[in-house]
Image (cartoon, helix red, strand yellow):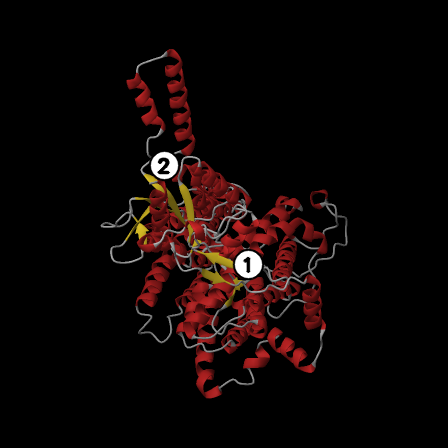
Amino acid sequence: MAEFNSVRSAPEMPEGDDAKHVFHHRIFLEPQEKKRNLKALVVKQAKETCSCTPAKVKDCVFSFFPILQWLPKYKLKECLLGDIMSGVIVGVLLVPQSIAYSLLAGQEPIYGLYTSFFAGIIYCIFGTSRHISVGIFGALCLMVGQVVDREVQRAGYDLEPAAVSGHTDAVVHVNGTISPVNQTSQKLLCDKTCYAIKVGATMTFTAGVYQVAMGFFQVGFVSVYLSDSLLSGFVTGASFTILTSQAKYLLGLDIPRTSGVGSLITTWINIFRNIHKTNFCDLITSFLCFLVLIPTKELNEHFKSRLKAPVPIELVVVVAATLASHLGKLRETYGSSIAGQIPTGFLPPSPPDWNLIPNVALDAIPIAIIGFAITVSLSEMFAKKHGYTVKANQEMYAIGFCNIIPSFFHCFTTSAALAKTLVKESTGCRTQVSGIVTSLLILIVLLVIAPLFYSLQKCVLAVITIVNLRGALRKFKDLPKMWHLSRVDTVIWLVTMASSALISTEIGLLVGVCFSMLCVIFRTQKPEAPLLGWVAESETYESLSAYKNLQTTPGVVVFRFEAPLYYINKECFKSTLYKQTGVNPAQVKAAKKKAAKRMLRQKEVGSGGNQTSISMELVSEPLGFHTIVIDCCAVQFLDTAGIRTLKEVCKDYEEVDVQVLLAQCNPSVRSSLIRGEFFKEGEDHLLFHSVHQAVDFALGAQEHNGTCAS
């Protein structure tokens, strides 16, 4: 049982008017009984987990497959029209983006269409958000493409001539002897294109396993270390790398794609070294596409409240560019690089390459974390906006299966994408039936239309990719506002953006996480620690440095430490307390000892009485206050170093006749103080529920001591 605001002992209590200054009503708090029987708790949890009843099985199945809950209740009249419209519009936008982002991931165009097709269907089955659009995301495609390039190079394919633009079968059996160039530790059973998708699918499978494992072990808390400013900075930094990787297509240059540390700088050096080889046909086409896409996209955004659906300008540009390339024979005449043969239908499913998992296991970790962090944050944002709830744990399962299952069908990594989700929401989406409509539209493209994009120039796809980076690059306009709101968040954004762009995406993410955690540590290492004054005619105490017209109590100093007190900031606590009070007990004691020694020497020598009286005054010089009240309302917890520091502070000030009182401690801090034997045996618990009560107690105790002394 804890008691607060008690007096030292009843016999010492003064009588009459003096008693009211010392006595305060005791407050007794009886703590809740905590059940610490670990065995009983484990047995109870095991019984709940292992019990199997029909109702529990039904709940488990329905929670794992949310489509079984909402699809039977689907309201055709209210939802069907909006879902069909949004599904068709997103599908129209997604077709050219899927083809374009395939280049970013180091894959053939057909694989981007596969990825978008499977992602929409699988998320509809497992997801709990009604609005988010799951599919290809630029930053993840970039990360996949970097790993694909690295593994393709390791396998020796980079020594081959550039693959002819076109799609080959999934497996090409080698009948003859393998050339020395392609001899690796294993026999190469497929060409460069086939090996690239094997690497991409294997990494997608591994990332999906990580995401499902995080959902199973409920370790979604990892995403809390990815703040909004960190994710925004990462996406913006990755956008620079994406833009750099696509620049060679704008100029029609045939240069190798670089990856690893400093790839952005290396790529631009290679571009400028080969700038004289620019294909002017691709350059003019790129310029014309920019001239059409950017203004139309801006108009779409400016008039989105008036337009029932955005103008599908990307599809218009793709169709027009394909016709122009085919009729003008741009490949044959000017040597433009084109998409090549895109087959119809689906390839037979095949498992990931298990031998590649050790090579990509580490690379899949940041992809998995980024994928589920973006998906969960977007799903929660739109659920809050539209008044329903999502299950973060189930979202991890959903995005995990959106990667695991498609990896057997030659797909690469997916996640939610903000731009397509906004389009989906604004065009009337009500449920994930919209995602099925989008997948059906992509299926039509896969079965019928895909071969018609044979003559599409790659520079057009690069322009589409770059134009879609506008949202991330616009974040620079928000920097002044961000700086005004939080300088720390702005610095985190800048560090993450710069490291992601200039070093590498994976290292940039790691640097951003480490730097943001260091910022938290630094903010608790040197927190605000002001002196407090009280507001007239109230019991409220506020910072003297923040507000005017606050009053102070003579003889009492009120000090607030606005952070947990633990091993990192214990020295900061002591030094700040000494600085704010103007009294360092160690220095006061040293000065008193020095004065006492001087006085003793003067007596021995027989000096005059005047100097002796001066020394006596130095020894007994008052400090200006008799009590320090530490406001602990912002101290969330104490560790052993923090408890030890409080003990030292109380002891040091006690030796110079200053008492230290603690006020507004939370239950965790009180418990730590009691377990740490902060109070001496037999001493009352001088813990106060408010600063005002502690100040009253200090004044009463001082008046009582003065009365007794007189």
Looking at the rendered structure, the kind of residue marked 2 is Lys
Q: Which mark is residue 604?
A: none
**For the C terminus, which image quadrant?**
top left
Q: Is there any visible trace of residue 92 in the rendered image?
A: yes
Q: How far apart are marks 1 and 2 (CA)?
A: 39 Å
Disc 1: which residue: 221
**Left or right of 699, for residue 243:** right
User: Mark 1 Cα within 10 Å, few/some/many (few <14, many 20+)?
Assistant: few
| Element carrying mark 1 | helix
For the point 37% across and 15% down, the residue is 602
Residue 121 locus on image (x, y percent): 57, 73
Looking at the image, the residue that sits furthest to the left is: 549
Q: Which one is nearer the viewer's eye here, 189 or 606?
A: 606
Residue 489 locus on image (x, y percent): 40, 50
Residue 448: image quadrant is: bottom right
Disc 2: which residue: 579
| Element carrying mark 2 | helix
Looking at the rendered structure, the kind of residue marked 1 is Phe
